[in-house]
Image: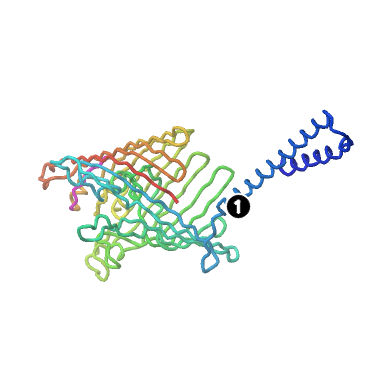
Amino acid sequence: MDSRIKRTAIAMAVATALALPGAAMAQTAKELELEARIAELEKLVREMQAEEATAQVVVEKEAPPAPTVQTANKGSLTIKGFVAATLFTQDADFAFGNGQNAQFPTTEYEKDEYTWGGDVRNTRLTLDWKGPAVGNMNFAGMLEADFFAGFAGGSFGDEQPIPRLRLAYADMNFGKSTVRIGQFWSPMFGNVPASPTHVAFPLGYGSAGTVGWRFPGIAYYHTFGGDGFTTKLSLAAMRGSWSPATDNEGAGEAGTPQLEARLDFGGKGWNVYVVGHWDEKDLSGPGVSEPNDSLTGEAVAVGAKFTMGPFTLQGNAYSGSAIGQQFGHITQFGDISGWGGWLQGSFKVGSNWSLNAFYGLDDPKDKDVIASGNNRLKHEQMALSAIYTTGPYLFGVEWMNSDLKYQTTACNEFSCATDNREGNQLSFSAWYKF
């Protein structure tokens, strides 16, 4: 019952008691009993008034709803992201770097078998705009950055990572259709393995089946269906890219744009997709007509994710040629064909814990790798992790093992000499999401 109703009922009872005929009579045992009852009721009223006043103070002290940040065009801005810190130890040097972007080993340590380090470059800031509606259109935009653009120079440079632009695009939404212009993820970038440490550079990225990159371009997305089953079409035309990747001077810019198409099918607890890629690079670069040394990049990728109660199984696989710019073929550039893929199983324990097991590989054709002047022939990666989440916090421990087969000397007419390089990383990571 509401405190005001209780108080009113008690007050009426007090008034009724005070109006009893016995008020004008001499003190009797019955009157004394009645007066004691009245005093008790008055005390109860005072206590309830005090409780209501205290409750009112608590309500007034509660934090008001977060204000909406309004932009110049009368839209709204959401600021989000996370702070991510990792402490790690490893027994090899890795590409694309040690710590949070370690993927495949470049050097094994012969002495002092382990090195220790810390890394905060996964820290990310995202600005997400929702613009005003204009007719039947809604506008939106996103800007996202992290800190993987290298380090400042000097003796203290490794504590001063440089910001890096990730995404920068504007959207025009027409009901179930969206047109996107700017820098965005290529449709080939699909499922992402769960990891507390490898976030901006996911497990297997450019090394064991995880492919796709961010490019400037234009994309169209359309969602079909409903009632528990949806289909999404993604089409993208993106800036060409190759190595060396210089502004309007490389082979990718001299060729055609990269073209991709993707279909997603999904329902409750599951999603599958297939994506195709095509591009053509002019290896002689712009302004050179001879020789006509074009190189076609082609690829098909498939992926799936299934959730059944506490279990989640997901994976991705690709097959293609000349897609080093999409982090294919262990991130090697050349006329290289091959395939790669990964699989991860996750088990949720209660509402806070999850256990994850990952395996991936990338296996380009040896003869293509060697003919193109590269030397990475096959790479396998495994990882085990335990992740604990509570509110905006995430804590995780991960062990990653990486095994690279590579060419060691020039080939003769019979064979090529090869060797294996192995690296391990043990890491503890903590995030604060905002």
Nearer the observer, 118 or 209 = 118
Residue 264 falls within the magenta-colored stretch? no
Extreme-front residue of the structure: 26
Disc 1 residue type (three-letter): Glu
Q: Is residue 223 left or right of residue 144?
A: right
Q: Is residue 27 left or right of residue 320?
A: right
Question: Which residue does the image show at 25% across and 60% down from the upper left?
Answer: 152
Extreme-top residue of the structure: 29
Residue 379 falls within the magenta-colored stretch? yes
Nearer the observer, 2 or 143 = 2
Examine the image and state in which quarter residue 158 appears: bottom left
Above/below status of 242 relative to 366 = below
Question: Which residue does the image show at 58% across and 66% down from the upper left?
Answer: 134
Question: Which residue does the image show at 84% across and 32% down from the upper left?
Answer: 27
Q: Is residue 176 left or right of residue 331?
A: right
Q: Dot 1 lies on which element? A: helix
Extreme-left residue of the structure: 412
Question: Which residue does the image show at 42% across and 44% down from the upper left?
Answer: 393
Nearer the observer, 60 or 151 = 60
Q: Position of residue 405 (x, y in %)?
A: 20, 41
Magenta segment's dominant SS is: strand
Above/below status of 363 relative to 72 = above
Q: Residues within 10 Å of mark 1 (few under 14, many from 20)?
A: few
Q: Position of residue 420 (x, y in %)?
A: 18, 40
Q: Which residue is mark 1?
A: 60
For the N terminus, the quadrant is: top right
Region rendered in magenta: 373-380
Nearer the observer, 325 or 433 = 433
Q: Position of residue 34 (x, y in %)?
A: 81, 33
For the image, the number of numbered tags is 1
**What colour scheme governs how the chains and residues are painted in the rendered image of this protein?**
rainbow
